[in-house]
Image (cartoon, grey):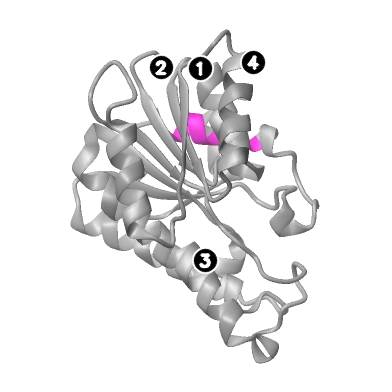
Amino acid sequence: MDETTVVVTGGTRGIGRAVAEAFAAEGATVVVAARDGAEVEETVEALRDANGNADAAGLRADVRDEFDVERLMETASRAGDAAGIDVVVAAAGVYHGESGHTPTDGESYAAFDDHWRTNARGVFATVREALPHLTDGARVLVPSGTVAREGKPGYGSYAISKAGAEAVVRGFAADTDHVVRCLDPGIVATELTGGQGRDPADVAPMFVWAATADPKSLDGDVIGLREWRQATR
């Protein structure tokens, strides 16, 4: 993946950090973005140190702000040896409250609005601003989960926002020629899940695989752990 440029939003923690590390290990140029500029700098240095001075860069960006995202994509498109972006992983996300303990009927308007702005509108902004810079055959990958499709008590507007993100993915998949896909890695141990679930490093290879697999099998819907494991046996 020496000539591949990968952008990872939410790339300093959880799934995003693990995915950035996995792509860097494969030799890709990796550009990470997150709200905390100090964490972005630390992540970039860690990627370089772990992978023989790997080609890594970062930018402080808030996916709730489309102008931040526009600047991110413009910067990333010039980061590699070749112009353009080959892979986008829209991993930025928030969860206000304790996982599984935020029922819809007790949700505040502030929590609803920020879940929606970050987890759904943020995905829209990420894909929308990446489009002018995507190369032929580029992939856009969005982490998701079963709460987006199955009614589970206690997940409130977080689940609603993830359902919105999946709808955004389906819309771009239908209306553009690019591969846009949701990946469901199951429950992953991150701040959003209270540290419960699989190690992010164990599911990060799923994203590397999805960035290189047959695009005809990767557009619009959701691919889960079972499909990934069956395809890579």
x, y (%) of residue 213?
Answer: 39, 30
Of the numbered discs 3 and 1, the one sitting upstream in the chain is: 1
* Residue 200 sits in quarter: top right
Up the image or down, 19 lies above or below 117; here it is above
Does label 2 or label 3 sit earlier along the sequence? 2
Q: Residue 173, relative to residue 211: is it above or below?
A: below
Badge count: 4
> From which residue to which does the magenta span run?
203-210
**Which residue position holds label 2?**
1
Q: Are marks 4 and 1 in contact (CB under 8 Å)?
A: no
Which amino acid type corresponds to the residue marked 4 in the rendered image?
Ala
Q: Which residue is mark 1?
A: 26
Identify the image quadrant of the N terminus: top left
Q: Mark 3 or mark 4: name the one nearer the start of the chain.
A: 4
Q: Amino acid at mark 1?
A: Glu
**Cβ atoms at labels 1 and 2 below 8 Å apart:** yes
Mark 2: which secondary structure? loop
Q: Quadrant of residue 25?
A: top right
Residue furthest out toward the top: 52
The disc placed on residue 162 is 3
